Amino acid sequence: MRQTALWPALAGVGVILCAAVLAFASATVGNAAPALEVPELDGQAFDLSALRGKVVIVNFWATWCPPCREEMPALDAFYRRYHGQGLEMIGLSTDRPHDRSDVTKVMQSYSYPAAVLDDAKVNDFGSPDVLPVTFVVDRSGVIRAKLTPDQTPVTEKSLSDAVLPLLAEKPAAQTSGNPGDPNAKP
């Protein structure tokens, strides 16, 4: 009888694990970026879908991850240089919520926004299977690059190669309700 009761529980765990793997698998180059809504450490709301028209870097990291910490200065320098040109960024710490003070302490050295992944209201990315992992999302919400230490590490050059062509693209023109507006689409 105990074995019979155990199977539904195991099946449920399997479904949850498969869903998490599939969610992160959908975060692939060429696909629309998964939904992501999370409060930043400073209390501001981060909503990836609300950032259409901007290029967005989504970086998954942890305080205990040496490769994550090694790439943070390059991410910060790039963010500082291009933030005023249409670049947004979020550093998503995979640390546990009780380690929030460690995350906050690390982020005091950097200017880009950060959040704790467990605080996400919506996280269709799921949990990463490797750290660090960085996604570059274009102005229309499509993932254009995935950077990982074993494939393409985050460096000034890899960020420039992935992001600068996207920043050079003009945002889609907004339709105007004013018929006399020379920028209005026909």
Image (cartoon, rainbow, N blue to C red):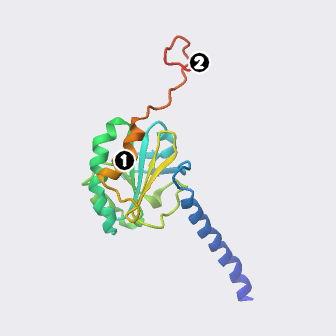
Instruction: Examine the rendered structure and indicate whether residue 183 appears above or below residue 95.
Output: above
Q: Callout 1, which amino acid? A: Asp
Disc 2 designates what residue?
Answer: 186
Q: Specify the quadrant that holds the C terminus.
A: top right
Kindly identify which numbered label has been placed on residue 95. none
Residue at 56% of width from left, 12% of height from top?
Answer: 179
Residue 15 vs residue 104, the one in the foreground: 15
What's the amino acid at mark 2? Pro
Q: Residue furthest left?
A: 109
Residue drawn at (32%, 36%) of the image? 84
Badge 1 density bin: few <14, some 14–19, many ≥20, Cα 10 Å = few
For label 2, count other residues whose C-alpha is less than 10 Å away and answer few (under 14), some (14-19) or many (20+).
few
Disc 1 element = helix
Residue 43 x/y as whole percent: 39, 48
Residue beneath disc 1: 161
Q: Secondary structure at mark 2?
A: loop
Mark 2 and mark 1 lie on one chain; the one further toward the N terminus is: 1
Q: Residue at x 34, y 68 (%)?
A: 65
Q: Report the quarter where the N terminus lies.
A: bottom right
| Residue 31 image point, x, y percent | 56, 50
Residue 116: where, in percent of width, then height?
41, 58
Circle 2/circle 1 CB separation < 8 Å: no
Q: Is residue 155 left or right of residue 59?
A: left
* Residue closest to the eye, 98 or 86: 86
User: Most extreme residue toward the top, as rendered?
Assistant: 180
